[in-house]
Amino acid sequence: MSDLPPTQQVDVKEVLRPLLFGLSEEDLDTLAAATRVRQLPADTVICHEGELGEAVYVLIDGEVQILQYLDDETERHLHYTQPGEFFGEMAVLQESDRTATVRTTVDSAILEIGKDSFLTVLGRSPSLGIRLMVRLTNRLRDSDRQAIDALREANEELMRTLRQLERLDRTKTDFIQVAAHELRTPVAALAGYAQMMGGHPALQNAPELRALTEGVLASTERLQRIFNNILDASKVMTGELKIRRSPVSMALVLRGVESEFARAIESRGLTFEILGLEGLPFCPADPDLLYKAFQHLVNNAIKYTPDGGRITVTGRVVDVPELGESLEIAVEDTGIGISPQDIELIFAKFYRTGEVAFHSSSTTAFKGGGPGLGLAITSGLIVAHGGRIWAESAGYDEENFPGSRFVVQLPLNPP
C-alpha cells in the first residue's frame, strides 16, 4: 500500500474494509469515526513499553519495528510490521500496560483507532475477534520461531566459547604439568646436594653455614611439596587418577596425618582430637590418595585456625541415598570460617578465602602461604573414590572465629 494518497485524502472506511472483511457498514462507520490518520517520520516512537493501551493501530504505509528495552539499556528486536497489519491490540484487549515499544523505521502512515470504539465493535462482531486471534497467533508463532533461532545461535556461541575455554584450560594444565615435572628434577638434585652438604664434617664446626644449608634444604623440600601438589592437581583436572583400592583403616590414616603435623600442632598450641574412628569398618579405597586427601584437609584446618584453637576429627557410618552405606568423616575447626559466597568456590583450584600471608614460609602458619590447591585436590580425590565432600560454616570472622566443618562421605560398597 505504498502508493496511498496523502493523509488528508485517505478514506479510512475503505482502508479498513478489506482488512476487516465481513464487518457491517455500521461497525465500519463506528471505527472510521473513532480513527485518525497520522503521518510519521522515520524513528518516531508510536507507543512506549509500560504505557496503558489506549488505542489500536493499523499500518497503512511504511514499516514499524516492535522491540523491547533490556535492563542493560540495549534493544531486543521482536519483529517488523508491514502495511495492512494491526499492532497494539494486545494491551487494549487485556486492559493492561504495553509489553513492547513500537517505532517507525521509515516515513510511515498509520491509523489510530480509539480503544472504546474498537472494543464496542469487537463485542458486536465475533468475526473481528477471530481475525485478531489469527493475527495474534501468527505473530506469536513468528516470535517463538525468532526466539528459538536466537536461542540456538546463543547456544552455538556458548558451545564455541566453552570449547575454546576447554582448549585454553587444557593448554594451561599441560603447561603446569610439564613445568612441574621439569622443575622437580633440578629441585630434587638441589635437595640432594643440600643433604650432602649438611652431613659434611666441615659444616659441623660452622653454625652459620649449617643454618644456611638447613634453610636451603627446608626450602627445596617445600618446593617439592608444591610441585607434587601441582602434579596431583593436574591429574585431578585431566581425569588421570588411578584408584587402586584396598581395605583402609580411617583411624590409621588420620593418626598418620596427625603425626605428620605433630610439630606444627604443638608449636602453635593447637588441640587435635580424633573421635569415633577406631570402631569404623575398613573403607575400600586407595590408601595413598586417601592419605593425601585428609592431609590437605587437616593442613587447611591448621592454616586457618588461630594459635590455641581446636581441630576435631569425627567419624561414623551413615546411610546415604545416592551412595548407600558410607563412612562419614568430618574435620571441624575453630578457625576464621568461610563466607557464604566462598563456600562453594573454595574447592576450585587456586582459589583462596580471606587475606593470606604470602610472605610466610610455612603452610602450617596461621593464614600461611601456599598455591591454593589443597582443597581442589581433596575434592578431586574424594570424587574419584565415588564419594562426596562439602563445607559448612556460619561465616567468615577473624575476631569471633565461627570455625568450619568439612564433611567427607565415602561409600563402603563403591560401584
Image (tube, grey):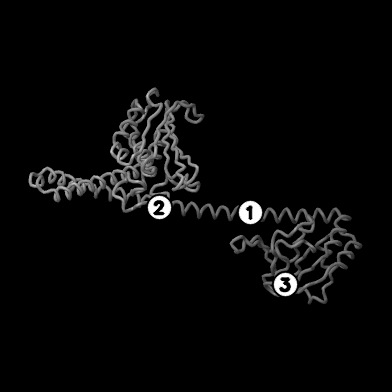
Q: Residues within 10 Å of mark 3 (few under 14, many from 20)?
A: many
Horizontal and vertical percent position of residue 206: 11, 49
Horizontal and vertical percent position of residue 303: 36, 44
Q: Amino acid at mark 1?
A: Arg
Left or right: residue 102 compared with residue 255: right
Which image quadrant is residue 71 in?
bottom right
Quadrant where the C terminus sits is: top left
Q: Amino acid at mark 3?
A: Ser
Left or right: residue 76 compared with residue 229: right
For the residues bearing labels 1 and 2, Cβ distance under 8 angstroms: no
**Pair 2/3: label in front:** 2
For mark 3, what is the residue?
Answer: 108
For mark 1, what is the residue?
Answer: 145
**Pair 1/2: label in front:** 2
For the residues bearing labels 3 and 1, Cβ distance under 8 angstroms: no
For mark 2, what is the residue?
Answer: 355
Tell me if I can see residue 415 in this picture.
no
Cα–Cα span, label 1 and label 2: 50 Å
Q: Residue at x 88, y 68 (%)?
A: 33
Cα–Cα span, label 3 and label 1: 27 Å
Quadrant where the N terminus sits is: bottom right
> Could you tell me which secondary element the residue under label 1 belongs to?
helix
> Is 21 or 197 nearer to us in this picture?
197
> Could you tell me which secondary element the residue under label 2 belongs to?
loop
> Could you tell me which secondary element the residue under label 3 belongs to?
strand
Q: As drawn, which residue projects farthest toward the left?
A: 202
Cα–Cα span, label 2 and label 3: 62 Å
Residue 330's label in the rendered image is none
Horizontal and vertical percent position of residue 345: 45, 47
